[in-house]
Amino acid sequence: KAGVTQTPRYLIKTRGQQVTLSCSPISGHRSVSWYQQTPGQGLQFLFEYFSETQRNKGNFPGRFSGRQFSNSRSEMNVSTLELGDSALYLCASSSGTSGTGELFFGEGSRLTVL
Amino acid sequence: QKEVEQDPGPLSVPEGAIVSLNCTYSNSAFQYFMWYRQYSRKGPELLMYTYSSGNKEDGRFTAQVDKSSKYISLFIRDSQPSDSATYLCAMSVSFGNEKLTFGTGTRLTIIP
């Protein structure tokens, strides 16, 4: 069974630009969550989508947005990039109903903002 | 102050030693506690999952939760070089909640 796939794996942007990251969850999983990982803050929850609806949202500014498609694939977008947005963005999928806390993470998209 | 505090290490121990990793938290609403392991350049993977207070054992790994002290631990017995990774504690407030609050992670190296 294929794992969670994130694209692109690495990207470099400049301040003020916008970026779109993509995530394909494990087949059959309906929940996709996004996390930002930085050395100082660790993993921080951005948002979660379940069956195309945002079910949970973290404490990030409105520049961070996401969506989920009918095939459960998800994208997140960051507009007006700032230097502090440099991070590893991790996507995780789950059934969304098991309640075990088991999220299956992808390898991440590493964003560098110059 | 962060909701979940975790000593970032790094922690280096010889092969075969017992490793103790810990997290403290401030939000008494946390009910579900997890430990994830993250190898370099990989995403985290779930190691252990526990609900409320108590112990849970899985092979060489034991997770402990003390809700009265807001303290959780992960013990690794007979540590192996393959255990070298970053260990992240994570918590959530409700069943089926994919919103996890993570510690910053402890980097562990097992020396052969």
Image: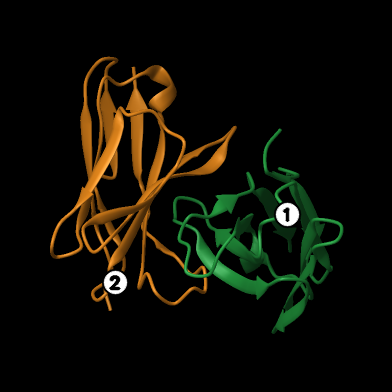
Chain colours: A orange, B green
Residue A13: where, in percent of width, then height? Answer: 26, 23
SS at mark 1?
Answer: loop
At a point 29% along the width and 15% down the height, the residue shown is A15
How many residues crowd around disc 1 within 10 Å: few (fewer than 14), some, or many (20 or more)?
Answer: few
Residue A113: where, in percent of width, then height? Answer: 34, 22
Same chain? Circles 1 and 2 = no
User: Is the residue under label 2 in contact with that under label 1 (CB below 8 Å)?
Assistant: no
SS at mark 2?
Answer: loop
At a point 36% along the width and 39% down the height, the residue shown is A110
Q: Nearer the viewer, residue B56 or B42?
A: B56
* Residue A21, picture quadrant: top left
Q: Nearer the viewer, residue B76 or B13?
A: B76
Residue B10: where, in percent of width, then height? Answer: 73, 44
Q: Nearer the viewer, residue A23 or A111?
A: A23
At a point 53% along the width and 57% down the height, the residue shown is B39
Q: On the picture, is B46 further left or further right than B60?
A: left
Name the residue beneath numbered marker 2: A29
Badge 1: chain ID: B
Tag 2: amino acid: His
Count the numbered circles shown: 2
From this view, report whether residue B108 is shown above or below residue A81. below
Badge 2: chain ID: A
Q: Nearer the viewer, residue B51 or A110?
A: B51
Q: On the picture, is A40 further left or further right than A55?
A: right
How many residues crowd around disc 2 within 10 Å: few (fewer than 14), some, or many (20 or more)?
Answer: many
Residue B110: where, in percent of width, then height? Answer: 72, 60
On-image quarter of the C terminus of chain A: top left
Numbered circle sitting on residue B28: 1
At a point 37% along the width and 69% down the height, the residue shown is A96
